[in-house]
Image (cartoon, rainbow, N blue to C red):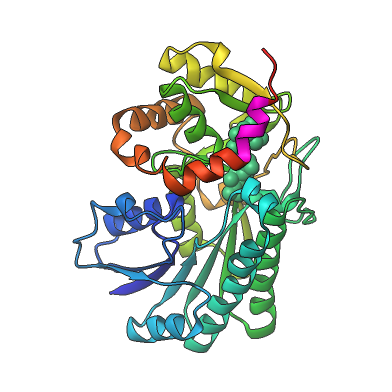
Amino acid sequence: MKTLLVTGGAGFIGSHFVRHILGKYPEYRVVNLDALKYAGNLDNLLDVADDPRYRFVHGDIADAPLVEQLLREYQVSAVVNFAAETHVDRSLLDAGGFILTDVHGTYVLLEAARRAGVERFLQVGTDEVYGHVEVGSTDELSPLTPRSPYSASKAGGDLMVLAYHTSYGLPVVITRASNNLGPNQYPEKFIPLFVTNAIDDEPLPLYGDGMQVRDWLYVVDHCEALDLVLHQGQVGEVYNVGGGNEKVNMEVAHRVLDTLGKSKELIKHVADRPGHDRRYSLDCAKLHALGWRPRHDFETALDLTLRWYVENEWWWRKIKTGEYMEYYRQQYQARLEGVRG
Ligand code: DAU
């Protein structure tokens, strides 16, 4: 029996990964450590909650005694770190929490993993650490030039992970993925925000000219890549994980509205995100050489995602209240009022 400590396993990507591991490896046990901050949601894991190979622990990765106790008590063989503050717009409102979790929290985990002698430490990262890419694509040796407090924090975490490999020989691997889409994504992010607003005939706040480019990756494909890197990635190495689906935001917004049968007039061009990265693009040759390819093209991934949000209003309607609405007003009210016509 191998035990994985999955941190942030109640979040969007983490919860898909927990399900993937329990489904694929009958001999694995998963301990999910999650602080259940605003985007952590146990509804994401209702289907595995009673699995005897699954344990949920409510706590923070920055709590060193707790992390050390879990590694010892469960004889953890590998740590997979999803726990992070992840939303660029929130990092522009308040960077401090990003540094605490994405940099300091990562350090606490690394230190505990080193003392416990874990066999693997997988840091789940983002392509945003490379900064925006005007032409061509970034590979794993491209310089890190993060431009938002979020991406700077993630870059700091990544560098600490690599330092623990160089300095102490901790067997680390890092992945850097492009934009994910799929079920269970918190509706502050572009696609679930636009889908749920469109369902309710609310405006879709498109930043700037809407011609920014993102590379979309279906969350299930991402989890398969993480599994591969966890088991077969070379220690001390970084692997880019891109969906190979570069789309301009406007095109994605149109496709959402077309599929839901809603008017394009719902799109409102609003004031841009400060420092908005224009484009990301990943060179994934290194991961392809390990044998991974995404199994879902963008159209299929978006259709599956849309269908899930249409069929699971119980999941997102209760999120779009309280704290969410407060954030939504802070982020969008003035922007939407500034829209003419
Ligand atoms: O590239 C990987 C990253 O993708 C992850 O590391 C981040 O955690 C994740 O949030 C995502 O970052 P983005 O900033 O690209 O994602 P977001 O969903 O916030 O925005 C996607 C694009 O849509 C971006 O160009 C901004 C635009 N956008 C977003 C929102 C929320 C809008 O036009 N309007 C919006 O209201």
- Magenta-highlighted residues: 331-337
**Quadrant placement of the C terminus:** top right
Looking at the picture, how far across and down is residue 149, in whole percent? 71, 56
In magenta segment, residue 289: no
Q: Is residue 139 or residue 188 the one in the foreground?
A: 188
Q: Is residue 147 left or right of residue 322?
A: right
State the residue at coordinates (48%, 45%): 324
What secondary structure is the stretch in magenta mostly built from?
helix
- Indicate the quadrant of ligand 1 in the picture: top right
Judged left or right of residue 213, residue 72 is: left
Classify residue 219 by image quadrant: top left
Look at 24% across and 62% down and name the residue there: 26
The vertical placement of 11 against 317, above or below, is: below
Seen at 44% across and 31% down, the residue is: 301
User: In the rendered image, which quarter is residue 172 located in?
Assistant: bottom right
* Residue 244 in view: no
Near-viewer residue (324 or 233): 324
Residue 66 at x, y percent in the picture: 43, 82
- Residue 56 appears in which quarter of the rendering? bottom left
Q: Above or below — where is 281 with respect to 54?
A: above
Q: Quadrant of the N terminus?
A: bottom left
Please report the residue visible at 49 percent of the width from the left and 23 percent of the height from the top: 202
Q: Is residue 73 above or below residue 242?
A: below
